[in-house]
Image (cartoon, rainbow, N blue to C red):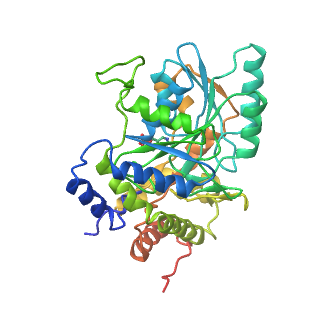
């Protein structure tokens, strides 16, 4: 029996254990140490553009602290892209604020500037602008940052970037994660690089980095005893996990290249298939890490649904998954306001994420192609040398 082909699995580079070994040798088995500082420097160097990075126990924790640092609380509203993973929106609830969900546009599947404008205009009229706008770069595809940034500047609302899926992606040559007032990254097990669990806050404001580290280490004031004047959190990344991160940074560019090769494979596979569209950058301003390659299935043209495809692949031990279900359709956020025209609902109905791990090679591609050909005999595929 062939092993299952999963959507996205961890892919170690080789040197991770050396960094962990060093932490053991030095007995820095704690949420601080050389790996924590080193991982932060590696990320700062990689992102460039004057970035300061604070590594956290999760991307969700980093986003929570971003909202805390903006003093967002009960009675406030935060605009959030609807088409995303729940972790983009949950921290809004953690601070007692209310999410307002914004639809996607069809080119990048990310926040629609038209819908954002409509929402901002509507809230400006009633004199209660949101305290932040959370924009996501879904599946690694950069959002339309020029338009979204201009709108947030016009209304003087801080833009937060959820770049959890987009490490290595660029918009007009600038790395995702360096556009917003603050951004978050994730190093969860399924992401482009992983520390098993982990995340980061990225900002150009060094004071915010310091504040984030302060809050994430229990908000301890300077004193010999334990003195606290603010509520603290225990969100700092461990020196062991950071060691994995240091090893992963050595292979990040290779991981991006491998994910992009997967996307090229699927583009070739489906190029002559009616009714299947492979998610691709709209133009050269956008460079996606293609964390997950996704397709849209138009049942009227294809003669089958995305669910038919998913089940056919599953039968052959190949995992695929529907796109993120929009937050305004989720039971937990029932009753939240939503601005848009239904694009995210259509994407959810027709979209499927294909196996996209950086560790998929020609053998896995062959098995996936054979699985697809069960349903779509004219899918183009021939073994590459
Ligand atoms: C993975 C992910 C997160 C959360 O990151 P964790 O490190 O798992 O907490 C947030 N937003 C998006 C879009 C994600 O994909």
Q: Is residue 305 visible?
A: no
Give the percent coordinates (x, y) of residue 155. 76, 27
Give the percent coordinates (x, y) of residue 295. 57, 56
Relative horizontal placement of residue 315, taking residue 375 as reference (left or right): left
Quadrant showing the N terminus: bottom left
Relative horizontal placement of residue 96, taking residue 232 as reference (left or right): right
- The relative height of residue 197 versus residue 280 in the rendered view (above or below) is above
- The relative height of residue 369 versus residue 95 in the rendered view (above or below) is below
Give the percent coordinates (x, y) of residue 36. 37, 48
Q: Nearer the viewer, residue 342 or 61?
A: 61
- The relative height of residue 160 versus residue 376 in the rendered view (above or below) is above
Q: Nearer the viewer, residue 282 or 241?
A: 241
Q: Residue at x 25, y 48 (%)?
A: 28
Q: Nearer the viewer, residue 81 or 274?
A: 81
Give the mark count. Answer: 0
Direction front: furthest residue: 224
Direction bottom: furthest residue: 385
Give the percent coordinates (x, y) of residue 27. 21, 50
Q: Nearer the viewer, residue 283 or 354?
A: 283
Q: Quadrant of residue 156?
A: top right
Q: Residue at x 49, y 31 (%)?
A: 211
Q: Residue at x 35, y 59 (%)?
A: 315
């Amino acid at each position: 029996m062939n092993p299952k082909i999963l959507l996205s699995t961890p892919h170690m580079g080789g040197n991770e254990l050396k960094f962990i070994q060093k932490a053991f040798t030095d007995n820095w088995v704690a949420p601080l140490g050389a790996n924590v500082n080193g991982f932060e420097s590696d990320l700062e160097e990689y992102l460039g553009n004057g970035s300061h990075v604070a590594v956290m126990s999760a991307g969700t924790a980093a986003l929570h602290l971003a909202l805390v640092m903006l003093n967002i609380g009960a009675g406030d509203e935060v605009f959030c892209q609807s088409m995303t993973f729940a972790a983009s929106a949950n921290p809004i609830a953690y601070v007692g604020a209310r999410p307002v969900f914004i639809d996607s546009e069809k080119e990048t599947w990310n926040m629609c500037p038209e819908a954002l404008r409509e929402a901002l205009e509507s809230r400006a009229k009633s004199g209660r602008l949101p305290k932040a706008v959370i924009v996501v770069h879904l599946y690694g595809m950069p959002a339309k940052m020029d338009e979204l940034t201009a709108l947030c500047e016009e209304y003087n609302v801080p833009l937060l970037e959820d770049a959890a899926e987009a490490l290595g992606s660029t918009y007009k040559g600038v790395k995702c994660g360096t556009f917003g007032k603050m951004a978050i990254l994730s190093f969860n097990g399924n992401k482009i690089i992983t520390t098993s669990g982990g995340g980061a806050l990225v900002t150009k404001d060094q004071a915010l980095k310091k504040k984030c580290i302060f809050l994430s280490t229990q908000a301890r004031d300077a004193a010999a005893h334990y003195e606290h004047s603010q509520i603290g959190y225990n969100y700092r990344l461990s020196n062991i996990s950071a060691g994995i991160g240091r090893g992963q940074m050595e292979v990040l560019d290779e991981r991006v290249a491998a994910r992009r090769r997967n996307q090229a494979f699927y583009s070739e596979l489906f190029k002559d298939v009616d009714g299947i569209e492979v998610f691709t950058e709209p133009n050269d301003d956008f460079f996606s890490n293609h964390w997950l390659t996704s397709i849209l299935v138009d049942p009227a043209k294809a003669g089958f649904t995305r669910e038919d495809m998913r089940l056919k692949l599953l039968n052959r031990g190949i995992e695929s998954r529907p796109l993120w279900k929009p937050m305004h359709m989720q039971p937990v956020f029932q009753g939240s306001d939503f601005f848009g025209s239904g694009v995210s609902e259509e994407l959810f109905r027709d979209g499927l994420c294909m196996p996209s791990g950086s560790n998929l090679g020609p053998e896995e591609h062959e098995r996936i192609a054979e699985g697809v050909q069960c349903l779509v005999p004219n899918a183009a595929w021939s073994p590459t040398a």
